[in-house]
Image (tube, rainbow, N blue to C red):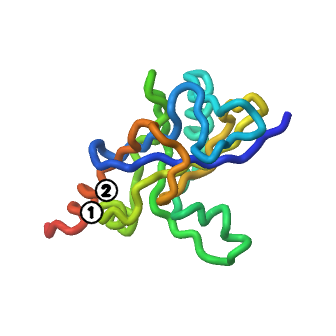
Amino acid sequence: MKTTLAALTSLIRGNHQNEIQLFPAGEFRANDGRPTDCACWVMTREIAEHLIQQVASRATPLVIDYEHQTLRAIKNGKPVPAAGWHHALEWREGEGLYAVNVEWTANASAAIAANEYRFISPVFLYDQQGHVTALLHSALTNTPALDGMDAVMLAAASQLAALNTPQ
């Protein structure tokens, strides 16, 4: 069975605490025409449940980097600083798959609050039918691949405020 790597992108908003919508429910495609090797990507409750178990079984949380540097580090030799981490996923019927309890770094929180980064892009594997089979990591980016997906949500501004509030 062939498995392929993909990444897509959605908007970050500050409405909800530390939640990121990674995938919409149902069938979806990127703005640039991907995937080209199957009709569409697919996210269902059953697929999500498998991914939720995969992520929950990991000892190490999944990283959120900047601009997909994790994919480029070997070639460009640059470091891969984390923007955040998450260790839990949640399916929301009719909406899609979310990363929950996301822990953002101070730098990422500040960049998001300043609108220096507005989108999140998960990197994932999928099979020949387009079913998502694994979530590898995600990235803060400014190049959206998906249009019309529900907003990706986080409270970076509140985290930044908490870091800057004297005790």
27, 86: nearer the viewer: 27
Q: Residue extending furthest left?
A: 167
- Location of mark 1 (residue): 160
Classed neighbour count for the residue bearing mark 2: other residues with Cα under 10 Å, few (<14), some (14–19), many (≥20): many
Q: Is residue 43 above or below residue 165?
A: above
- The quadrant of the rendering that contains the C terminus is bottom left
Disc 1 residue crowd, few under 14, some 14–19, many 20+, Cα 10 Å: many
- Above or below 127: residue 135: below
- Which residue sits furthest right? 1
Residue 86 x/y as whole percent: 48, 49
Q: Which residue is mark 2?
A: 156
Query: Based on the displayed image, in which of its 4 quarters is residue 127 positioned?
Result: top right
- Quarter of the image where the N terminus is located: top right
Q: Position of residue 110 (x, y in %)?
A: 32, 66
Circle count: 2
Q: Residue at 53% of width from left, 61% of height from top?
A: 65
Q: Is residue 150 above or below residue 112?
A: above
Q: Please name the residue shown 48% across and 30% down the image.
A: 96
Q: Are marks 2 and 1 in contact (CB under 8 Å)?
A: yes
Type of amino acid at the residue the image marks with label 1: Leu
* Percent x, y of residue 33: 65, 43
User: In screen coordinates, is 21 left or right of 35?
Assistant: left
Image location of residue 57, percent across then percent down: 60, 39
Kindly identify the amino acid type of the residue bearing the numbered disc 2: Ala
- Residue 67: which numbered mark, if any? none
Q: Is residue 58 left or right of residue 87?
A: right
Kindly state the secondary structure of the residue where label 2 is placed: helix
* Residue lying at 48% horizontally and 41% vertically, measured from the top left: 147
Helix, strand or loop at mark 1: helix
Which residue appears at 55% of the width and 38% of the height? 56
Q: Quadrant of residue 15?
A: top left
Q: Residue furthest bottom?
A: 77
